Image (tube, rainbow, N blue to C red):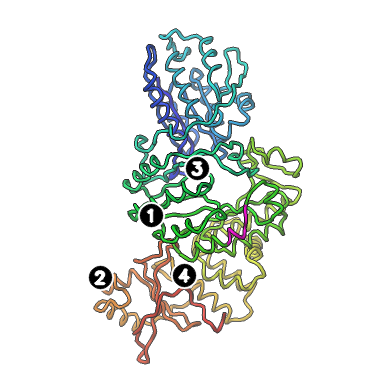
Amino acid sequence: MKILLAAVNAKYIHSNLAVYCLRAYAQKYLSGQKESGLRDAEIETAEYTINQQIDDILADIYKRKPDVLCFSCYIWNMEYAKALVRELGKIRPDMPIWLGGPEVSYDAEDVLTRLPAVKGIMKGEGEETFAELCKMYCTYGTEERGDTDAGYAKADEDESLAEIEGISYRDRNGGIKSNRWRRVMDLNKVPFVYAMSGIEQHNKIIYYESSRGCPFSCSYCLSSVDKQLRFRDLNLVKKELQFFIDQGAPQVKFVDRTFNCKHEHAVSIWRYIAEHDRGITNFHFEVAADLLNDEELEILSRMRPGLVQLEIGVQSTNPDTIREIRRTMDFSKVRSAVNRIRIGRNIHRHLDLIAGLPYEDIKSFAGSFDDVYALKPEQLQLGFLKVLKGSHMEEKKKEYGLVCQDRTPYEALYTRWMSYEDMIRLKGVEEMVEVYYNSGQFRNTLEALETKFSSAFLMYDGMYRFYEKCGYEKQQHKRGARYEILLGFIESSVSECDRDKEYFRELLTFDYYLRENAKSRPDFAGEYKVSKEILRSFYEKEETEHRYLPSYTGYDRNQMRKMTHLEYFAWSGKYVLFDYKERDVLSKDARTCEIVRSCQDKLVSCKSEVKSIKCREYT
């Protein structure tokens, strides 16, 4: 009996934790159920991505020849799942198809009505439900394939399905039945999936859970539906984390909804990974920043740069909005914790906002944006409300005047407070933030540019209006072109004189070379101002002294020149050396140092790392 668990992921680097948990639990369950007549179950997993052609996925599933097919369904893959199910129903009408996951759990009967090829839906947590379904099929087989050695009959199947909690299904007469939901399970009963999954860990993000459920009640989130928060035993967690560390997994992403909601649990795990760190694995946590206490912040401050990264869902700073979405958050505490973490310069901070929430109009959202932007996170994600089936937000749509798309991901189109035109405007701001801020490639230029605007929101809003005016928003742009466009925006919007223009040109050049060891000079940077004589004398001296490039012992002058860049900035009168062999762990910026000329026109002394070429006279 071959049972296939299929997942369609958003990207190749993602893995689907759900199908691996289901397989691991079912294999353990069935191994303890070896009573007479129970067939051996071959449970396979198959992972695809939304970037693959549906026909290719369809063909691969067909070639695997499963007896039973199960799909893991989320908002990002539901359209693929529906398309595949409809075609598979034509190609393999003999094969029972089951769906599971949050996208089908809360309207299971409607899904069965819309997709007649589907046999049933697994609702909520699936490990125990899937294991019982596997046992049923291994006991009775599938009638249509003539697999009836165990005395299969449709009546037997209906009897068995009626006893399985947590499912909705189609009975032998085509009627739709729904059984009661299954109670949540003990998380310690789920086997550790990665030791047996065969996942190529160096090519995938590893997803891991040390808890399920959430103590909070945010109305837009399905985690608020299940109030039964559970934690995996810390002894198990530590053993499993050590496996990731020993294997050299690049990144382990905890899927815990609010990782630090239990202080002892969070502290124990953070201490463990800090003490056992081998300098390779990065751990990602979603936390509530206002819950971080002094002990947790102190532990985080001592961690290796890049060991952990934190995702912090702020969503809004409007008190009326926070109260209406039933969220608990003290933004003053969030601000304090995030700023304290920032001081350490060792942790990537990812902060989230959601557009389209109740009581948030465009002015209010701009205020939330400016509040969060002022915290200078490494990444600021501007998301749009998704109205998930089964959420409290869905129940309040009429009251909020909330209209959302019918297709996944059910994104809000407009509300009583936010028009569709406003949403379009925010989409433009989102694009500019993603291109210019989240890329980290324009940091110094943006910091200087912010001083020319009354708010950060208006700066990014102005950028997109410039894109629209010039027709840039409909084009694909190479990285170098983004610098040219930003310079054009600056010159048309804020530059009052030629000195301003030259200053911003040099800031852009500084930002460009922080990331890019360019073989050819970009047009926007203008003429290269370092003479051949200075270049030659500098690298000749470095070849023997290694005064500014101490890690380059064994490299000759030509090799050093290829691995570094020397730039002169006329505005500040500085020579800056960019060292691409040594980069910042978080920002990926090159190491920089200022080199001062002597009266003989030689570069002779080095100052500390250069953060920017801004000069006091200007700022």
Disc 4 to disc 2, C-alpha distance: 27 Å
Can you say which quadrant of the picture contains the N terminus?
top left
> Which mark is in front, 1 or 4?
1
Query: Would you say 559 lies left or right of 203 here?
Result: left
Q: Residue at x 48, y 13 (%)?
A: 144
The local secondary structure at tag 1 comes to: helix
Q: Main secondary structure of the magenta part?
A: helix
Residue nearest the viewer, comparing 115 with 44: 44
Q: Quadrant of residue 489?
A: bottom right
Disc 3 to disc 2, C-alpha distance: 43 Å
> Which mark is in front, 3 or 1?
1
> Which mark is in front, 4 or 2?
2
Q: Which mark is residue 134?
A: none
Question: Which amino acid, mark 1?
Answer: Ala
Return the residue at label 2.
Answer: 555
Residue nearest the viewer, comparing 327 with 400: 327
Disc 3 to disc 4, C-alpha distance: 34 Å
Return the residue at label 3.
Answer: 10
Q: Which mark is residue 522?
A: 4
Disc 3 to disc 1, C-alpha distance: 31 Å
Of label 3 and label 2, which has the lower sequence position?
3
Q: Which mark is residue 274?
A: 1
Of label 1 and label 4, which has the lower sequence position?
1
Tell me: residue 430, above or below residue 504. above
